[in-house]
């Protein structure tokens, strides 16, 4: 099973936020053509992660480290990015309508 598939399964099965899941490393993962809507990515390491043609609507990225991640042709409408590190993130062809960016770090973000 691909690393990405294993991580998503663990993420889907986490109930309340447990310390062991904070240690999941999603950095440099490659997600393409997948529906991840509504998942809780809060507090996770998602540095340099590539999302291509993904549905991420209503996802929770609160306090996540998304530095240099790429969102290409994705739907992140209604997602929560409060206090997330979005430094160097690229949103290309991505719907960010109604996303909550309050308190997020947005240095060199490409919209």
Image (cartoon, rainbow, N blue to C red):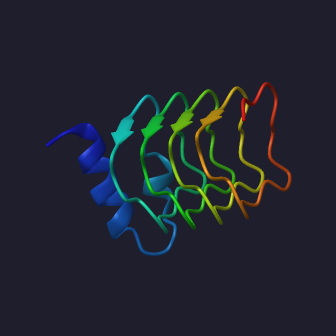
Residue extending furthest toward the bottom? 15
Q: Is residue 26 visible?
A: no
Name the residue nearer the viewer: 41 or 57: 57
Q: In which quarter of the image is residue 62?
A: bottom right
Q: Please tell me whether residue 104 is drawn above or below residue 35 in the rendered image.
A: above
* Rendering quarter of residue 81: bottom right
The residue most toward the front is 93
Residue 59 in view: yes
Name the residue nearer the viewer: 88 or 24.
88
Task: Report whether 59 appears left or right of 7.
Answer: right
Residue furthest out toward the right:
103
Question: Which quarter of the rendered picture does the N terminus lie within?
Answer: top left
Residue drawn at x 39%, y 68% is 14
Q: Residue at x 47, y 64 (%)?
A: 39
Total marks in image: 0
Q: Where is residue 26 in the image (x, y as percent from the top left)?
A: 43, 39
Residue at horizontal 76 percent and vertical 56 percent from the top? 82
Position of residue 68 in the picture relative to residue 101 (left or right): left
Looking at the picture, how far across and down is residue 49, in whole percent?
A: 48, 33
Image location of residue 56, percent across then percent down: 50, 57
Which residue is located at x 32 percent, y 49 percent? 7
> What is the residue that sits farthest to the left in this orientation?
1
53 left or right of 83?
A: left
Q: In front here: 108 or 75?
A: 75
- Quarter in which the C terminus is drawn: top right
* Residue 8 place in picture, x, y as percent: 33, 54
Nearer to us in this view, 111 or 1: 111
């Amino acid at each position: 099973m691909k690393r990405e598939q294993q991580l998503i399964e663990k993420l889907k099965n986490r109930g309340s936020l447990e310390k062991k899941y904070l240690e999941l490393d999603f950095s440099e993962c490659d997600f393409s053509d997948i529906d991840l809507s509504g998942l809780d990515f809060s507090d996770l390491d998602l540095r340099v992660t590539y999302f291509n043609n993904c549905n991420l609507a209503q996802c929770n990225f609160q306090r996540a480290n998304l530095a240099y991640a790429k969102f290409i042709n994705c739907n992140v409408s209604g997602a929560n990015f409060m206090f997330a590190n979005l430094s160097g993130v690229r949103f290309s062809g991505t719907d960010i309508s109604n996303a909550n960016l309050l308190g997020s770090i947005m240095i060199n973000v490409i919209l």
